[in-house]
Image (cartoon, grey):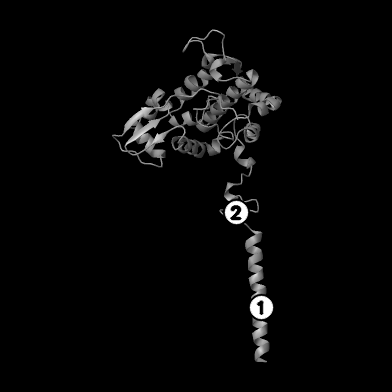
Amino acid sequence: MKNYKIYLFALVAFFSLSCQNTNSEGTKVSGEKSSMGEKTSDIKIFDEDKFAVENGPNHKPWTELLQKHVDKKGMVDYKGFKKDIDKLDAYLKTLSDDPAKKSWSEDEQLAYWINAYNAFAIKLVVDNYPVKSIKDLGPSIKIPVVSDVWHYEFFQIGGKDYSLDQIEHGTIRKQFNEPRIHFAVNCASISCPPLLDEAYVPSMLDKQLTAQAERFVNDEQRNEIAKESIEVSSIFNWFKGDFTKNGSLIKFLNTYSKTKINENAKVKYMNYDWSLNDQ
């Protein structure tokens, strides 16, 4: 009888352990690896709800294009965009036909303008691909700050001719006190902040801008940061006023930098690579 009880106890324990192992393998939690070797937290699941907007165009088609043609480094497959030109044109038409309005929330307006800049910049390159640099495009006679690719009015929004410069400087920087936009708008060049592989949307805008700021500041190819000296992107020189409204440039950088910089650190600026950010 005693041996029978021992046998019965062992059998129950065996079945209990088997059930636990089945559950732990059948349900993956964030941080565990899947059968493909990916952490479940790294597997992107398209959340359609977060791309819904109360006002303005639906940015979901732009996200679908970006996830298809932009890699994790922010490099762009322009040949792929060229194959999907009809879908890109359809999205651009929704932007042109439904311009941002003052009645929209600030986040709805800003998300709209960032997406518009990035999408029309892609369109300009795609229509002229292959090209070595976006700066080679635009009017045949180029006069800096007067008639160059940034001032080239090649699209319309709300029936009005627009250029990339009008979006970035005439609208975004003029209407919004948001220095993080410099890490969101993408000028189709190697030294530009990497292009995000999803649309900017009002419900996620603050998180997206912060993530892009952290990504850019800590990118060793675009910024070299140490405690006593830094060599950073020329963006921080060109738009220094945007970054220093609430303190020094170093104070701004320290908000996002993993390496904390001394306030009296030496500051240098890198040369800007205008080569196309082509895959």
In the image, residue 144 above or below residue 43: above
Quadrant in the picture for residue 61: top right
Disc 2: which residue: 33
Q: Secondary structure at mark 1?
A: helix
Q: Which residue is mark 1?
A: 12
Q: From the viewer's perspective, tell me whether residue 207 is left or right of residue 79.
A: left
Q: Residues within 10 Å of mark 2 (few under 14, many from 20)?
A: some
Q: Position of residue 9 (x, y in %)?
A: 64, 82
Distance between mark 1 and mark 2 Cα atoms: 30 Å
Q: Quick one: 144 or 266, which is closer to the camera?
A: 266
Q: Nearer the viewer, residue 95 or 190?
A: 190
Q: Single out the mark in the foreground, 1 or 2.
A: 2
Residue 218 falls left or right of residue 58: left
User: In x, y percent, where is residue 222?
Assistant: 46, 32
Kindly identify which numbered label has been placed on residue 150.
none
Residue 37, given in percent of the width and then of the height, sits at 62, 51
Residue 119 makes an appearance in the image: yes
Query: How far from the left and from the top, in percent, is residue 69?
Result: 64, 32
Which of the marked residues, 1 or 2, is nearer the chain's N terminus? Answer: 1
Find residue 247 and report its image quarter: top left
Residue 103 visible within the image: no
